Image (cartoon, rainbow, N blue to C red):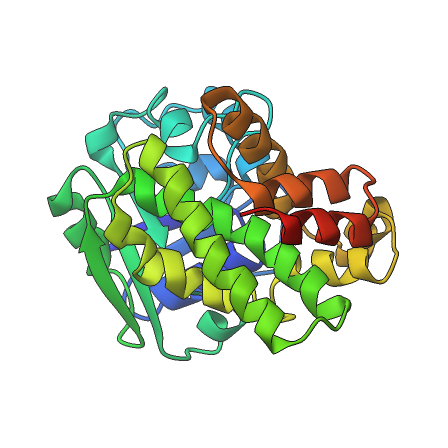
Amino acid sequence: MALAVIGAGKWGEALFRAFSNKNECVITSRTPRNIQNFVSLDEALKREYLVIAVASQSLKTFLANIDLKNKKILVASKGIDKDNFKFINEIYEEYVPKENIAYIGGPSFAKEVKESKPTALVIASYNLSLAKEFSEFFPNFIKTYIDSDVMGVEIAGAYKNVIAIASGICAGLNLGENAKASLLSRGLVEMDRFGEIFGAKKETFLGLAGAGDLFLTANSTLSRNYRVGLGLASGKSLDVILDELGEVAEGVFTTEAIYKLSKKFGIYTPIANEVYHILNGKDIKESLKDLLSWD
């Protein structure tokens, strides 16, 4: 089956290589890359099936300038728009019928997918037939599960990046494994509490898209957001950390969106709140003291 991947960052390229195992696949991005089967955007858009791995903060501008109404789309981005506080599925649905969209979730480092290591993913869609269509594209080393909880998968994929920053701070301060385990377990509860307000299902946060992705992202230096936390714990400024990363750390933008959404809807999100304040200059030790004093 012919399909195209739009977005040639690490995740987009990893997916391209995975899909190329069984399918005729091309890849494109804003910046030309020296990748086999790299084509122009116009050429990529001739395919019926599109896998879009564009950073969440660039998504609205990207979608506003192309016509995707008759395409079948698999979304491979995670985050929340920091300017209008919209979830990724809400942004897509402004431009594409929701029955034409599916979303990837679950624990999946690009490096390991690129190395063809065993991986399990969730494909969520309001159209389960479409999700099953996309599941057929995946290679044998990736096990896929079909789900209808689009909002739950989207929130889990975005929120875990915020908890990963907190986990990196915890590790960087050498607070110990007890503290990290407590942080992750309470972080999972916080994700679920936030998601419930927007109609997400509790079981989603206990599965691959929630606990699975959280445990992966919040425990490894392969995670950009975890490395942001490590950098903050070492006393580096956010600008220096992001410059050193040389990549997008979605959790930084997502933290602001979650903080403001939680204020708007009255949601109790103590970990996200403290990460937000740290990113905006609050002393980490003071933030830790405040976090430990909350219920």
Position of residue 84 in the picture relative to residue 229 (left or right): left
Residue in the picture at 51% in, 58% down? 11
262 relative to 167, above or below: above
- Up/down of 131 relative to 101, above or below: below
Residue 118: horizontal and vertical position, in percent?
36, 78
Residue 180 relative to residue 206: left or right = right
Q: Tell me what residue is drawn at x 27 percent, y 48 percent.
A: 202
Q: Residue placed at 19% from the left, 32% from the top?
A: 99
Point 44% across, 65% down: residue: 108
Q: Position of residue 122 (x, y in %)?
A: 29, 57
- Residue 196: x %, y % from top left: 32, 37
Q: Position of residue 194 (x, y in %)?
A: 42, 38
Asked which quadrant contains residue 279, the reply is top right
Give the camera-side residue of 183 and 40. 183
Q: Is there any visible trace of residue 88 in the rendered image?
A: yes
**For residue 238, side relative to residue 43 (left or right):** right
Q: Is residue 58 visible?
A: no
Q: How many marks?
A: 0
Within the image, what quadrant is residue 45 found in?
Answer: top left
| Residue 116 lies in quadrant | bottom left
129 and 234: which one is in front?
Answer: 234
Q: Quadrant of the N terminus?
A: bottom left
Above or below residue 151? Residue 117 is below
In the image: residue 55, left or right of residue 135: right
Looking at the image, which is closer to me, 18 or 170?
Answer: 170
